[in-house]
Image (spheres, grey):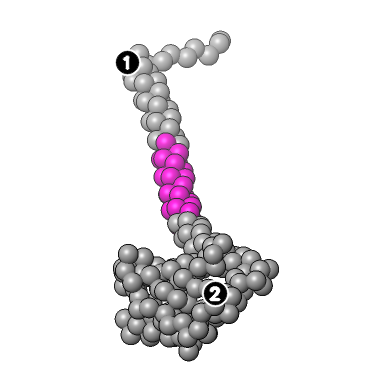
Amino acid sequence: MPNISINLLPPELKITKVQEERKSKLNKISLSVLAVCVILMSGILVLKTLQFINLQAIKKDIATVQTQISGYKTEEGLIYLLQDRISTIKTAQKDPSGSVISFNLLQKLLVPGVTISSFTVDKNEDINLTGEANSLGSLQQFFDNITNPDLTEGRIVTVTENSLGKSSTSNLIFDVTLYHHPTSEQLNLTNTQPTAIKKQ
């Protein structure tokens, strides 16, 4: 006689069990999705942090490079100034008829605290000077030298002050013209005395 199986459980209980299993699966899937989202968000946060750190490092490097460039520009300006002065000296040395003599004479007349930034000699061998002095005393001593016939060897007749002012560093800036003659014999002059500094 065959076995007969009879399910005495109500159908509602079977449906409830299926629903619970489905709900459990959904919960597991939800937790898995949530875990993945948390991992992704953490990864994004770490990436953003690293990008921020790298950006700050790049900005710092840029600031350092800009500072270096500024320093190089200052050094480049000084190099150009030195090259200009060297060119002026070489030009004077190539003209022994008067310019080099005037330049050498000027070197003897300079005093500590006075620097010459521009030195030009025209066709009449008159000299235009532009320079700076760190004090009124040193500038006055320089002016006394260029108007002293014993020191100028009789080569400077008149000194004209073109301008006098102050630089951004509070140094005195001056622009003067030295009118001179090659030799007293050539001009048939004797005991030439330079006049006091004249203002234009």
Label 2: state its secondary structure: loop
Residue 168 image-quadrant placement: bottom left
The three-letter amino acid code for the residue at tag 1 is Glu
Residue 133 appears at what percent x and percent y? 38, 77
Is residue 56 a member of the stretch shown in magenta?
yes
Q: Which residues are magenta?
A: 37-62
Q: Is residue 14 above or below residue 92?
A: above
Residue marked by disc 2: 187
The count of marks equals 2
Asked whether the viewer can see residue 81, the reply is no
Residue 24 appears at what percent x and percent y? 39, 29
94 displayed left or right of 183: right
**Between marks 1 and 2 in the image, the one whose residue lies nearer the viewer:** 2
Residue marked by disc 1: 12
Q: Answer few, some or many: residues within 10 Å of disc 1's Cα (few below 14, many 20 plus, some between 14 and 19).
A: few
167 displayed left or right of 183: left
Residue 82 appears at what percent x and percent y? 56, 68
Quarter of the image with the C terminus is: bottom left
For this rendering, which residue is in front, 157 or 11?
157
Name the residue at 40% across, 23% down: 22
